[in-house]
Structures are given as C-alpha cells and as structure tokens.
Amino acid sequence: MRLSTFKKAFGANVKKQRIEKNLTQSELAEKLGIDTSSLGRMECGINFVSARMLLKISSALEINPAELFNFGNKINGNSVFSNKIEQILELLFECDEETLEYLYNILISALKMKK
C-alpha cells in the first residue's frame, strides 16, 4: 500500500465522520485548533496527522480512533488489516507523548522508504 493511498483513505474517513456529525470544516478545525485549509489538506490526503492530532480528531468527532482507519474495501478489504490497526492503536494509547512522536517518525520514515 502506498503512503498516498493510505493518507487519502484516512482523510476520506475524517471527512465522512465530520459530515455525519453535521460539522463544517470550519467548526471541526476550530475544535482542533487548526485552520480550515490544514483540515482540508488532511481530508484530501495531502497531509497526514501526528499522534496527538489523531487523538484530538477522534475526541472532537466523539469516535474511537480506530474508526478513522476502517478503510474497508478502500484499501484491500482485508479484515486482518483492520484488526492489526486496532491492535496498533491499543498499544499507542499506552504510550506517552514523546514515545508517540518517536514512533510516528519511525512509521513515516519506513513508509517513505517503501515508495
């Protein structure tokens, strides 16, 4: 799976959840403490989020963070994939902020090397 595909699927899920909660981009951006254009770039898959922002988004949308990684058939339709994401998220919730940033940087570097 390419990083760009992953970011687009993630962004589409953020947008879907935002719309389901009847929030505008402006309203969600305000809850997240970011500008509307940043949220737009995230929803389009141009930018990705930090672990901290992932938690802010899930909190603002009142959902489990794993729901943002439920890509269904958008990526490979494999339920094992979704289960792995949930397991990873459970582990991440046990980490402090410094460890989350460290792991995030490792993940981004690893995904870039696979391009």
Image (spheres, grey):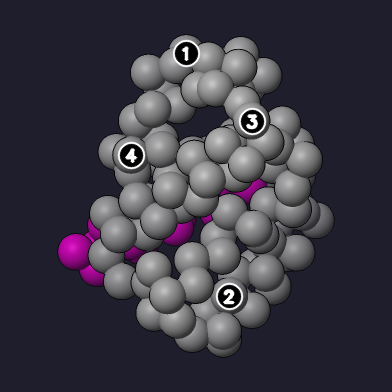
Label of residue 22 in the image? 3
Q: Position of residue 29 (x, y in %)?
A: 55, 19
- Say if residue 60 shows up in the picture: yes
In the image, the segment drawn in magenta is 100-115
Q: What residue is shown at x 61% (from left), y 26% (from top)?
A: 23
Residue 102 counted in the magenta span: yes
Separation (CA) of disc 1 from disc 3 = 18 Å
Label of residue 18 in the image? none
Q: What residue is shown at x 52% (from left), y 45% (from top)?
A: 16
Quarter of image, res 115: bottom left
User: Could you say whether the residue bearing mark 4 is in a helix, strand or loop?
Assistant: loop
Identify residue type, mark 3.
Asn
**Sequence-wise, which precedes: disc 2 or disc 3?**
3
- Of marks 2 and 3, the one in the foreground: 3
**Sequence-wise, which precedes: disc 4 or disc 3?**
3
Left or right: 94 with respect to 32? Answer: right
What residue did someone put label 1 on?
A: 35
- Of marks 1 and 3, the one in the foreground: 3
Comparing 57 with 61, the one in front is: 61
Q: Position of residue 85 (x, y in %)?
A: 60, 69
Vertical order, 18 against 87 (above or below): above
Left or right: 103 with respect to 61? Answer: left
What residue did someone put label 2 on?
A: 82
Q: What residue is shown at x 77% (from left), y 40% (from top)?
A: 62
